[in-house]
Amino acid sequence: MSALLSNQWVLMAPAFLLVISLIVFIHEMGHYLVGRWSGIGIVAFSFGFGPEIWGFTDRHGTRWKISAIPLGGYVRFYGDADAASTPDFDALEDLTPEERARTFTGAALWKRALTVAAGPIANFLLAIVILAGIFGVYGKYIADPVVAQVSEGSAAEAAGIVPGDLLLRIDGNPIATFDDVQRYVSIRPGVPMTLTVRRGGEEVNIPMTPKLTEIKDRFGNKIELGIIGIMTDRSSGNLRVVHFTPGEAVVEAVRETGHIVTGTFRYIGNILAGRMKADQLGGPIAVAQAAGQVATLGIVALLHLAAVLSVSIGLLNLMPVPVLDGGHLMFYAVEALRGKPVGETAQGIAFRVGMFLVLSLMVFVTWNDITRNISHWVG
């Protein structure tokens, strides 16, 4: 275990930078490519925030640069006041009609919406490409949904699940693999459900409620999940590697990406409903630690983490908060309904509120990271 922890800390910084750089590059490249295709002028493409460390200007006048704080990045369009794509209304008034047409604000509504949406979409596509590559090259471990063991005192034991039961459906949803059960149950603690099993040639409907349970992963991290207390094993579940053709790998990757999206929304819903605590939300420190931990397992595990984080960042950016992509799309939806853009004053107030919300979230998740690790750091 000590050797594993040592490797984790050694790999943490390079693994974190590799994963974050890949995700940020693809996200911002989505904005850049669609913006260029739409005829919008692009002032800068930056890796990170803050002072420029190194950069160059291409023949289109775009400044490509690496900045001092490697926690994100941005594309700044012509006519923007800052990296958050806040319109520079004063500068826009001094532009000619031809110059204004090249600004982000002066572009047609559909071009602006598509350019903004391209960033999160690129994140989802990146996840699909990574997962399809993993499934196509390495395959995927699966096990049949057969119960090999029932934990003592568990919800499954109380409900009457016994070893040998074949799991068919959960709340009417077909079960193909044991992972289907784990995925469904883990994000529904305290939610009553019905498990349909085949036992002795007959189908039996068994109601039960997953218990919110704190477990530790292989790295010692504490995780809260919904648990019903069933397990399979190599022989009972016929554990095997399934290989996919390129087309099948893409389909499986799309399905897996959908599971990540569903799980994320369900987790947020559990927090809002009070079924799970928000202290599991992590910030940059948690991501860096996860990257270092997963990197000890090999490149495939690290790529899988990159896919999960890419989906998460895509979803985060789609939140309807000004300064995020979702906030811009919200403004465009209002503009489409009103037939004219949201006023300058309203946009200014909204962007300040949005920045406050984003910074508050960053402070909260960073505080979670610190309190989660302070005992290790002090010790």
Image (spheres, rainbow, N blue to C red):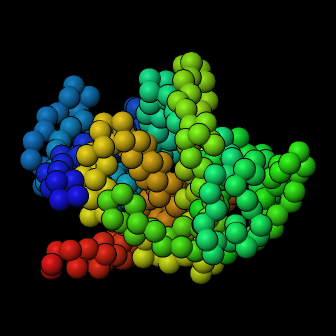
Q: Is residue 278 above or below residue 53?
A: below
- Estimate the x, y position of residue 211 in percent, counting from the top left: 62, 74
Quadrant where the N terminus lies?
A: bottom left
Query: Is residue 168 visible in this depiction of the protein?
Result: yes
- Count of picture labels: 0
Quadrant in which residue 138 is drawn: top left
Q: Residue at x 9, y 42 (%)?
A: 54
- Estimate the x, y position of residue 83 in percent, counting from the top left: 30, 55
Relative side of 256 to 279, left or right:
right
- Estimate the x, y position of residue 339 in percent, counting from the top left: 66, 55
Which is nearer the eye, 168 or 279?
168
Q: Residue at x 22, y 78 (%)?
A: 374
Quadrant where the C terminus lies?
A: bottom left
Q: Is residue 211 above or below residue 150?
A: below
- Estimate the x, y position of residue 205 in percent, counting from the top left: 86, 60
In the image as oriented, which residue stretches furthest toward the right?
202
Relative side of 81 to 200, left or right:
left
Q: Residue at x 75, y 51 (%)?
A: 165
Which is nearer the eye, 317 or 354?
317
Q: Residue at x 58, y 74 (%)?
A: 212
Query: Is residue 107 visible in this depiction of the protein?
Result: no
